[in-house]
Each structure stands twice: as structure tokens, then as C-alpha cells.
Amino acid sequence: MAQENTSTGTPAPHPVPHALHAGHAAPPVPPAEPTPATWGRIDDEGTVYVITAEGERAVGVWQAGSPDEGLVHYARRFDDVRTEVELLETRLVSGAGDPKHALSSATQIRDGLAESAVVGDLAALAARLDYVIAHAEKALAAAKAEREEARTAAVARKQELAEEAEKIAADSTQWKAAGDRLRAILDEWKTVKGVDRKTDDELWKRFSKAREAFNRRRGSHFAELDKQRASAKQRKEELIAEAEAISESEDWGETAGRYKDLMTEWKAAGRAPKDSDEALWQRFRAAQDKFFARRSAVFSERDAEFSQNAARKEELLIEAEKIDAAANLEAAKSALRKIQEQWDEIGKVPRERIRELDGRLKAVQDAVKSAEDTRWRRTDPEAQARAAQFRERVEQFESQAAKARAAGDERRAKKADEQAAQWREWLQAAEAAVADR
């Protein structure tokens, strides 16, 4: 029988070829391919043996043909096993195979080699299986490490998201932006995979608890805001009622002062519900406009009497605009105080001149104040001293107001009261600065 293409495994040693001629080296002869007979035999009774490092082992019985045919049959069975191992190896090395499946299959084949009914190079096949098993175990270990690394990263990211959500729940008052961010965190949360169920459940509970806490706090905020706006609406309706009631008053000074107070109280009342706040304001403003329109009409008739006062104030302004605060601040302040006192004594001017004249005086006042502020910033005087200075001015104007009332001069008294109020605001600011130091 011809012995060809049926052998497997590692080739057996080949005999050294004889020399063609004495004294001449023989040409190289290619090694002969191992045949099934290299790895097994069939005895006269048909028992098939495979040759191993430990000796012969019976693997079956052959009586269907010649011994050579029987060996070829068992060698083909060996080839089938070897082909399966080669496929496992090829797929594993290329990365296309499943390491877990390769490990299981290779281990099963290796464990069965000792009893397999095949004829071939079992030692070489066992070595190849050991390689496949080692490679599969290494690939499984790498995959496990990669999964663990991915899990660690996923856990860390969800912890970061949970912590951010908890911070938002505890601190944020940017309700819309914070709500949008929590929704974005939830969307990202769903994309983070690979966390074990226990850890994922724990982190989800933290995130969910933070969301609920934020929603409760936001709900409480808007509930309180609704309550405040309802209260503001009621208060503004009360202010409107008073503003409408005094709109016919002819006590120009006192009523104008009361409208100023009403405006302060209006601002302090806060915002009413959006659907009513603008309508309330229009009613309040209409009452004010009615009063001040009437007052303006009356004052227009009086403006003709105030032209001489305007001329005197222009003379004062010429003097005031010569004040050089940069040259001598104390002298400038003293000069300005005298001018302010004379200004107040002169009295009213035509209505259309008020803005112009007062604006020019204010420019001088601002220049002196700016110089004084600059000196304060440069020298940093003690806050208590400033407060004492402001307090003295308040007391001075309060005293002037009291004297004017005692003398029956209500106009000068009110003017002094206004100046005292201005200095009192500065005093309060200075005292607040002292309190904050």
C-alpha cells in the first residue's frame, strides 16, 4: 500500500543516506514523511495500538480491511482532532475566537487524549493543546483585567455623578440650570455600563435621593414664592388704595413725601403674581401721576415768582464752580457748606430751571465728594471717625429742623429734615462698614 498524506505530528528520525561513490558525499535526501506506521500498528488479531512515550496502548480493533487501511483510518481520526486543535489555536491567536470556549474545548480534548482511539503523534498534540490552554488562560486573564479596569472606571464615574447630584441638591438655587444638569446626569448615567448590581444599586439610591431632595427643595422654594407674591399683591392693593385716596390732596409737600414713602413701600412689597403685577403698577402710577400733574400745574403758576431766586443761585454757582477741592479739600468743603446753606435760604426757582441749577450744584458737590473719597481711599481714616462726622452732621441738620419748626418756618424745617436724612443714610453706611470690619 502506498504510504502518503496520512501521517501527522512530529517526523521520526530519518536514516542517513549511503554514499553514491566511495570518497564522495552523498547529495541531501529530503526526510521521508512519517506514516501511520510511525505512530501505531495492528497485530495479527486486529488489535490497533498507538505508540506513546510510555509505550503502546490499545485504541481499538480493525478487521474491515488490511492493517495499512486500518492505520490510515485511525490516523484520519487523529487528523480530525488535530485539525480541531489547529482551528482553536488559529482563532485564538487572531483574536477572533472566544478564549473561554477555546480553554474549555482544549482542556476537554487534552483530558481525553489518554483514552482517545486515534493513531498519531499524541505528544506533539498534547504540547500544542498545552500552548492553546496557556494562551486561552492568558487571554481570559487579560479580558478579566480589562473588565475590572472598565468596571472601576464606571464605578468612579457614577460616584462622580452621584456626588455632583448631591452637591446640586444641597446648594444650588439656580433652579432651571440645576434641573437641566440633573437631567443630563441621568442621561449620562444610563450610558455608563459595567458596574456590578450591588454597587450600581447603592450609587443609584444616592443619585435618586439627591434628585428627590432637589425637587423637594425647589418645590418648597416656588411654593414659598407663590405665598410671598400673594402677600405682595395684597400689600400693593392696600398701597394703591391709599395712593388713590390722596391723589386729590392740595398739601403738596406732605403728600409728595407720602408718595415717596409709598414708592419705597411698593418696592419693599416685592413682586406680585406675574399676571397681575403690571396692572397693579399701572393703577399705582396713575394715582401718583394724577397728584403730581395737579401739583405741577399749581407750581407752574408760581414759577414766575422765582426768577429772582434763580438769578441769585446762578451767582452762587459761579462762586461754587471756582472751588478747587484738589488744592485744599477742607477749604473747599467749608466753602461748599456755606454755599449750600445760602442755596437753601434762597428758596425755589422756576420749575424748568430746577434740573439745570441743581445739576450744576450737584456737579460741584460730586467733585468735592470725589476728592474727599479719594483722600479717604488714600489715607484710610478710621471708620469710627467717619461715622462720628456723619452723626454730627445728622444732629446739626436735625437741630436746624427743630429750630426752624420752633420759629414756624416749616419750609426750612423740611429742607433740613431732607438733608438730615441724606446724612443719616451716609451714617448708616459708615456704621455698617464699621460693623463689617
Image (cartoon, rainbow, N blue to C red):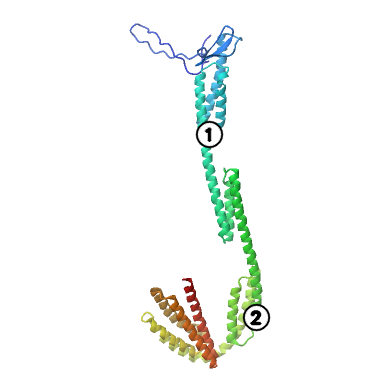
Residue 205 appears left or right of 94: right
Q: Is residue 196 above or below residue 286?
A: above
**Mark 1 residue type:** Leu
Q: Is residue 140 above or below residue 162?
A: above
User: Residue 288, how many percent across, how many down?
Assistant: 61, 80
User: Residue 146, how many percent across, how many down?
Assistant: 51, 39
Circle nearer the viewer, 2 or 1 = 1
Q: Are marks 2 and 1 in contact (CB under 8 Å)?
A: no
The residue shown at (52%, 30%) is 136
The residue shown at (58%, 83%) is 256
Distance, label 2 to label 1, CA atoms, is 85 Å
Q: Which of 373 and 387 is in front in this view?
A: 387
- Location of mark 1 (residue): 140
Label 1: state its secondary structure. helix
> Which mark is on residue 242?
2
> Would residue 328 be visible to someone looking at this image?
yes
User: Residue 372, how many percent across, how many down?
Assistant: 41, 78
Q: In which quarter of the image is residue 80?
A: top right
Number of numbered markers: 2
> Would residue 349 be visible to someone looking at this image?
no
Q: How crowded is mark 1: few (under 14 residues within 10 Å), some or many (20 or more)?
A: some
Label 2: state its secondary structure. helix
**Mark 2 residue type:** Glu
